[in-house]
Image (spheres, grey):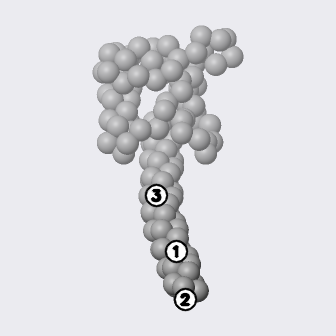
């Protein structure tokens, strides 16, 4: 009888360790996937910031899930917001005097961020053509 309790106890400990290892592996996989997603978002964020700067925008440094862009000489924050909205791209525009020429851009997928840059180029090209 003592052998059975001892054997059952060992079996229970082994089962518990097996379940714990499985949970840790699943959690580690989820954590690794989340870390990879954050790294890719950071890459998309940094590439988008660089592209917007190349187009003449001032973009604040960011380690968050958004970019704060503005102070472009050819387009105000409100005009940029409205033009993006016409292309079904939603950003946040602020009307406070200190930041009225800025927009908050939430980081999306690589394809979404590329579309933002492409539409921004079109907006600026249209402004440039209209100014001639």
Q: Quadrant of the N terminus?
A: bottom right
Task: Label 3: state its secondary structure.
Answer: helix
Sooner in the amino-acid sequence: mark 2 or mark 3: 2
Q: Nearer the viewer, mark 2 or mark 3?
A: 2
Disc 3 to disc 1: CB gap under 8 Å: no
Task: Label 2: state its secondary structure.
Answer: helix
57 in relation to 30, above or below: above
Q: Nearer the viewer, mark 3 or mark 1?
A: 1
29 in relation to 47, above or below: below
The answer for how far apart the CA atoms under marks 2 and 3 are is: 40 Å
Disc 1 to disc 2: CB gap under 8 Å: no
Instruction: Classify mark 3: residues with Cα within 10 Å, few (<14), some (14-19) or many (20+).
Output: few
Seen in the image, is 40 located left or right of residue 64? left
Q: Position of residue 72 (x, y in %)?
A: 53, 26
What is the quadrant of residue 113 in the picture? Answer: top left
Q: Position of residue 111 (x, y in %)?
A: 32, 42
**Residue at the extreme bottom of the image, as rendered:** 3
Sooner in the amino-acid sequence: mark 3 or mark 1: 1
Seen in the image, is 71 located left or right of residue 40? right
Q: Is residue 30 visible?
A: yes
67 in relation to 42, above or below: above
User: Measuring 45% from the left and 63% from the top, which residue is drawn there?
Assistant: 26
The answer for how far apart the CA atoms under marks 3 and 1 are is: 27 Å
Residue nearest the viewer, comparing 45 with 11: 11
User: Measuring 53% from the left and 17% from the top, which residue is drawn there?
Assistant: 93
For disc 2, the marked residue is 3
Instruction: Classify mark 1: residues with Cα within 10 Å, few (<14), some (14-19) or many (20+).
Output: few
Q: Which mark is residue 30?
A: 3
User: Measuring 51% from the left and 21% from the top, which residue is drawn there?
Assistant: 92
**Residue at the extreme front of the image, as rendered:** 1
For disc 1, the marked residue is 12
Residue nearest the viewer, comparing 97 with 28: 28
């Amino acid at each position: 009888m003592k052998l059975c309790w001892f054997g059952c106890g060992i079996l229970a400990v082994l089962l518990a360790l097996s379940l714990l290892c499985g949970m840790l592996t699943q959690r580690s996989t989820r954590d690794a996937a989340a870390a990879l997603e954050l790294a890719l978002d950071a890459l998309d964020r940094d590439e988008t910031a660089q592209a917007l700067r190349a187009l003449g925008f001032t973009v604040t440094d960011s380690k968050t899930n958004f970019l704060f862009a503005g102070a472009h000489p050819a387009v105000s924050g409100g005009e940029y917001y409205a033009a993006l909205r016409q292309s079904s791209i939603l950003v946040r525009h602020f009307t406070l005097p200190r930041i009225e020429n800025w927009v908050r851009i939430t980081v999306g997928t690589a394809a979404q961020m590329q579309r933002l840059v492409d539409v921004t180029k079109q907006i600026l090209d249209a402004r440039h053509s209209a100014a001639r």
